[in-house]
Image: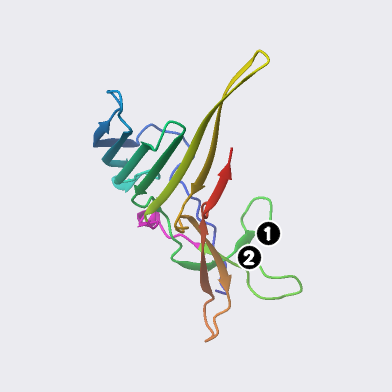
């Protein structure tokens, strides 16, 4: 890593062109139960979708950032009595694609305004080499997927009526619990460059960044 090299820019040309293409297709199935008769206490639906979204540029096809192949939703609501409802919603979605780093590379910076002389950047006073993440070439783009998303929510809603002195109100009070079983849904990964205890090239430490944990609310 002692020989400086020019930074490779993440584009093939500085001229904008319309040569990229994309395609998105899929199928969705929905089954619904409605309250259509007096005395019906149960309603809800189940839906499943299978979808594909790809992008193609310069002969290379990659999955789009929001390419989620499988999506399942189950929504159920039950009227316990005349003033209390209970609802359940469960969601599942297969993981979105992301671009993982393949390693590390030394940070190289220009030493002149014309960017003709380059040098490896170090910590102040001739310290250690500074490393950045190496994401490889375009074939590595969106090459891996995040873990699947799943979440169970429940809600109890109490209905009430207030009338006094010319005031007439309908009130709904609810308790809602998001992510009941506290599933860790990963939204992204954070990578830190750390020293290799065995010597040689630094290592990558990956830490998952998650969405909501279990979260009760009142309203």
Judging from the image, what secondary structure is the residue with disc 2 in?
strand
Give coordinates of residue 104: x percent, y percent.
Answer: 51, 68
Q: Which residue is mark 2?
A: 119
Extreme bottom residue here? 198
On residue 111, which mark appears? 1
Extreme right residue here? 125
- 186 or 117, which is in the foreground? 186
Separation of residues labelled 2 and 1 (CA atoms)? 7 Å
Judging from the image, what secondary structure is the residue with disc 1 in?
loop
Q: Is residue 179 left or right of residue 45?
A: right
Q: Is residue 198 left or right of residue 49?
A: right
Q: Quadrant of the C terminus?
A: top right
Give coordinates of residue 35: x percent, y percent.
Answer: 30, 27
Give coordinates of residue 54: x percent, y percent.
Answer: 31, 42
Q: Kindly check if marks 2 and 1 are in contact, taking CB atoms under 8 A apart as contact.
A: yes
Q: Is residue 144 magenta?
A: yes
User: Is residue 175 something one can see in this rendering?
Assistant: yes
User: Is residue 58 something one can see in this rendering?
Assistant: no
Give coordinates of residue 73: x percent, y percent.
Answer: 33, 42
- 90 or 48, which is in the foreground? 90
């Amino acid at each position: 890593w002692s020989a400086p090299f020019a930074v490779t820019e993440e584009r093939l040309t500085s001229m904008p062109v319309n040569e990229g293409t994309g395609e998105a297709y899929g199928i969705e199935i929905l089954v619904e139960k409605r309250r259509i008769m007096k005395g019906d206490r149960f309603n809800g639906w189940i839906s499943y979708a299978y979808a594909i979204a790809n992008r193609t540029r310069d002969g290379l096809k990659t999955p789009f950032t929001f390419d989620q192949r499988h999506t399942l939703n189950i929504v159920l609501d039950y009227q316990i009595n005349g003033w209390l409802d209970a609802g359940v919603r469960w969601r599942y979605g297969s993981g979105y694609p992301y671009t993982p780093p393949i390693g590390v590379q030394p940070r190289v910076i220009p030493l002149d305004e014309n960017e003709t002389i380059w040098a490896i950047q170090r910590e102040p006073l001739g310290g250690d080499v500074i490393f950045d993440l190496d994401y490889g070439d375009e074939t590595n783009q969106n090459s891996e997927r995040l873990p699947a998303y799943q979440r169970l929510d429940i809600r109890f809603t109490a209905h009430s009526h207030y009338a006094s002195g010319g005031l007439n109100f309908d009130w709904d009070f609810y308790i809602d619990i998001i992510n009941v079983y506290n599933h860790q849904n990963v939204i992204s990964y954070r990578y830190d460059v750390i020293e290799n205890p065995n010597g040689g090239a630094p290592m990558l430490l990956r830490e998952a960044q998650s969405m909501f944990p279990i979260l009760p609310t009142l309203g």
